[in-house]
Amino acid sequence: MEKFIILTGVAAPLPMENVNTDMIIPKQFLKTIKRTGLREGLFYEHRFNDQGKEIEDFVLNRSPYHKAKILITEGNFGCGSSREHAPWALLDFGIRCIIALSFADIFRNNCFQNGILPITLPQEDIDRLMDGVERGTNAVLTVDLEAQTITGPDDSSISFDIDPFHKQCLLEGHDNIALTMKKKDKIADFEAQQKQEQPWQWIGQA
């Protein structure tokens, strides 16, 4: 997956609590197992009317937020089913960082596995950022993962916490599969030893 080091981009305000994964990507878009092509399904029932036309007052349909790379929202974001299509849709739209009061655990872990940085902040900081980006012209933020800071256009900065393991994985662009492949030599050595010590386990295998 793509490394996350420093991200500068438009931040879109979504002042909603308990945004579930069905709201993020409705069930009719779950037929694919590809991680691309889900952009149009993101918040579909909020972005489009029954005729398939854009709802002009939804934040991601308005300039400059239609080019958002960062989403600022409230508590329990990503609750509901564990569908990994939710972070896929966000990523396909261009969003690589979500700043929220809290996240559903499975959604949060799915974000880390797909190169999206989920940041948890207290209500005071959420309100401050939300107020700033709602002004439109001041909607650009810079998220520095190495320094663990969020900087606004006025150069004011907010610090955030992240556990060292997930931080390093994002900086290096490693999901669980990539982490496993880093140890492929040790895995090969273990398999070779097992073939010698317990050959019956390998009958019929190459």
Image: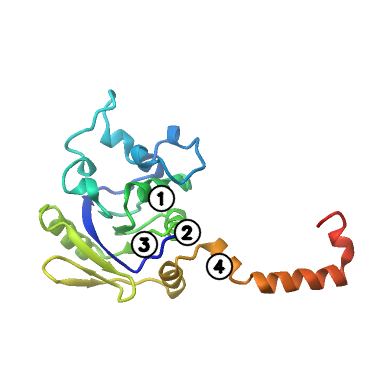
Q: CA distance from mark 4 to mark 3?
A: 18 Å
Along the horizontal axis of the image, is 122 left or right of 63?
right
Residue 12 in picture, x, y percent from top left: 22, 51
> Comparing marks 1 and 4, which lies closer to the viewer?
4
Q: CA distance from mark 2 to mark 3?
A: 10 Å
**Is the C terminus in the top left, top right, bottom left or bottom right quadrant?**
bottom right
Q: CA distance from mark 1 to mark 3?
A: 10 Å
Name the residue that disc number 1 marks: 87
- Whether tag 1 and tag 2 are in contact, CB under 8 A, the answer is yes
Question: In the displayed structure, would residue 90 be above or below residue 101?
Answer: above
Name the residue that disc number 2 marks: 113
Q: CA distance from mark 2 to mark 4?
A: 11 Å
Amino acid beneath label 2: Gln
Name the residue that disc number 3 marks: 117
Name the residue that disc number 4 marks: 179
- Whether tag 2 and tag 4 are in contact, CB under 8 A, the answer is no
Q: CA distance from mark 1 to mark 2?
A: 9 Å
Name which of mark 1 and mark 4 comes first in the sequence: 1
> Comparing marks 2 and 4, which lies closer to the viewer?
4
Element assignment for label 2: helix
